Image (cartoon, rainbow, N blue to C red):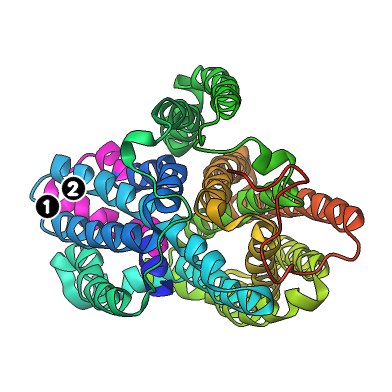
């Protein structure tokens, strides 16, 4: 499961370093190559909740195998693309497959593990998230260097052998369990899926196109997204009143202890976490003239620290609860804050060395945020809602990442074009990350004070006194 999750998240970032090669090989436009990246992120975020609901209704093992198969096939098509349009279409389809796959990971962990062992499983999942985000540029640079002109194709082809092995092992090892409700596609809340998709699209599309004027040309989509979100909530409440199962139960946010705050903490943290990598890439490559591989290697201390601490934090959350998250957020603030202070002060040749230790410290903190927060947020969610609850959590993280990329990118460019240079731009962007992290810390502290003795439940509890969300 973690192998499949790693591949789907890796493809968010690994393609960035291949864009110049893609543009040369396919004679693609700049806007077209950007859609190779943003189109994947867009469809990924759009179908997460739908994928979670399908897993809850039809069975998570079945959806896992189907989505993983689709991801392998679309990866092969992307690698074999002979034109810009074919590649963009393949990436859009690949994003749909990844968005269908991702909720099955959290849903299966929620279903198959309980208590402290669930914390350890989510700790491994958190390490996977951190590694996939940070390792993408490094791995992409290595593949491009190894395969030359066709290296961009192998950025996609590399998913085929890994995906096929994961598919064979998942077919053998993932347990066959029937869903609590034997659902069929015809019983799905199709109007709810459409309304939610339009609301998410209205937020994501301007953000993923922010580097190409999306915020100014598509600003009207934000209020439209608000209208669709209001219609979605009203429709879901009407579906519940009629005794049917909605795509996203309103009581998931209002009556499940800690879910709403945990989802908000995760989304806010990802605003700073997701945007950092774009800013670092622009600073090292455009500002200091480093290669994509060198740029990726310089941020690996964050990935390594995150991978190690995430696994350990997954074990600690069963005993220490929300305090693990608060400690991690504090370390992120210190580490990223030190980067903002040091970069303007050191010479170009020493920047990589100067930021290594602060990034390692920030990575250790980051590993203590993602997995424990996921564990605590989903702990009281009934098993029959595990897929869609995890999907909604990840949708918030995708939205947070898109917002963070837009905000941090804009702040970075403002610092650069304002006459202060790349160093000031990076420092300003890192201070934005600190700001987002402090907001997340405030909400986590509020959650800790509301539930001072909170521990993992060890087994599923009803979402409220009114009973489970059925």
Secondary-structure class at tag 2 = helix
Task: Check disc 1 and report the residue beneath it.
Answer: 81
The stretch drawn in magenta includes residue 107: no
Left or right: 34 as drawn, with respect to 286: left
Task: Check disc 2 and report the residue beneath it.
Answer: 87
Q: Relative to 171, does residue 211 appear above or below in the rendering?
A: above
Picture coordinates of residue 161 (x, y %)? 21, 76
- Which of the two labelled residues, at mark 2 and mark 1, occupies the earlier sequence position? 1
Picture coordinates of residue 95 (x, y %)? 33, 49
Left or right: 255 as drawn, with respect to 240: right
- The quarter of the picture where the N terminus appears is bottom left
Left or right: 163 as drawn, with respect to 379: left
Picture coordinates of residue 58 (x, y %)? 36, 51
Residue toward you, 97 or 203: 97
Task: Find residue 375 and report its image quarter.
Answer: bottom right
Picture coordinates of residue 46 (x, y %)? 42, 39
- The quarter of the picture where the C terminus appears is top right
Q: Give the prevailing secondary structure in the magenta stretch.
A: helix
Q: Cβ–Cβ below 8 Å for labels 2 and 1?
A: yes
Q: Which residues are magenta?
A: 9-35
Whether residue 130 is visible here, answered yes or no, is no
The stretch drawn in magenta includes residue 23: yes
Task: Find residue 362 and report its image quarter.
Answer: bottom right
Secondary-structure class at tag 1 = loop
Left or right: 325 as drawn, with respect to 343: right
Q: Find residue 334 and name its label.
A: none
Q: Relative to 20, does residue 355 appear above or below in the rendering?
A: below
């Amino acid at each position: 499961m973690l192998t499949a999750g790693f591949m789907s998240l890796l493809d968010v970032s690994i393609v960035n370093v291949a864009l110049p090669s893609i543009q040369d090989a396919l004679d693609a436009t700049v806007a077209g190559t950007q859609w190779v990246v943003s189109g994947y992120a867009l469809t990924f975020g759009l179908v997460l909740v739908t994928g979670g609901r399908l897993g809850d209704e039809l069975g998570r093992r079945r959806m896992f195998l189907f989505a993983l198969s689709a991801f392998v096939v679309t990866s092969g098509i992307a690698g074999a693309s002979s034109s810009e349009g074919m590649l963009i279409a393949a990436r859009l389809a690949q994003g749909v497959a990844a968005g269908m796959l991702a909720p099955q990971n959290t849903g299966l962990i929620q279903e198959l593990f309980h208590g402290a062992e669930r914390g350890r499983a989510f700790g491994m999942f958190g390490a996977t998230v951190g590694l996939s985000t940070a390792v993408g540029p490094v791995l992409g640079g290595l593949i491009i260097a190894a395969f030359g002109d066709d290296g961009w194709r192998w950025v996609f082809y590399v998913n085929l052998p890994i995906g096929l092995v994961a598919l064979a092992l998942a077919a053998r090892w993932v347990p066959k369990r029937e869903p609590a409700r034997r659902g069929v596609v015809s019983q799905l809340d199709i109007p709810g899926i459409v309304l939610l998709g339009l609301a998410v699209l209205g937020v994501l599309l301007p953000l993923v196109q922010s580097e190409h004027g999306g915020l100014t040309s598509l600003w009207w989509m934000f209020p439209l997204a608000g209208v669709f979100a209001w219609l979605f909530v009203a429709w879901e409440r009407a579906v519940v009143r009629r005794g049917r199962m909605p795509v996203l139960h309103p009581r998931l946010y209002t009556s499940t202890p800690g879910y709403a705050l945990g989802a908000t903490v995760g989304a806010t943290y990802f605003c700073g976490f997701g945007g950092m990598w774009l800013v670092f890439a622009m600073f090292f490559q455009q500002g200091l003239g480093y290669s994509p591989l060198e740029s990726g290697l310089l941020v690996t201390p964050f990935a390594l620290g995150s991978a190690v601490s995430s696994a350990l934090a997954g074990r600690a959350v069963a005993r220490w609860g929300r305090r693990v998250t608060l400690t991690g957020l504090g370390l992120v603030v210190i580490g990223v804050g030190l980067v903002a202070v040091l970069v303007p002060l050191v010479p170009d040749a020493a920047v990589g060395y100067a930021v290594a230790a602060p990034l390692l410290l920030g990575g250790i903190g980051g590993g203590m945020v993602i997995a424990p927060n996921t564990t605590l947020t989903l702990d009281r969610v009934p098993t029959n809602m595990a897929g869609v609850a995890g999907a909604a959590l990840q949708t918030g993280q995708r939205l947070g990442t898109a917002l963070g990329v837009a905000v941090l990118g804009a702040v970075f460019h403002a610092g650069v074009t304002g006459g202060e240079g790349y160093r000031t731009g990076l420092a300003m962007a890192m201070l934005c990350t600190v700001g987002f992290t402090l907001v997340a810390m405030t909400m986590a502290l509020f959650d800790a004070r509301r539930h001072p003795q909170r521990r993992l439940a060890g087994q599923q509890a009803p979402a409220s006194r009114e009973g489970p969300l059925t």
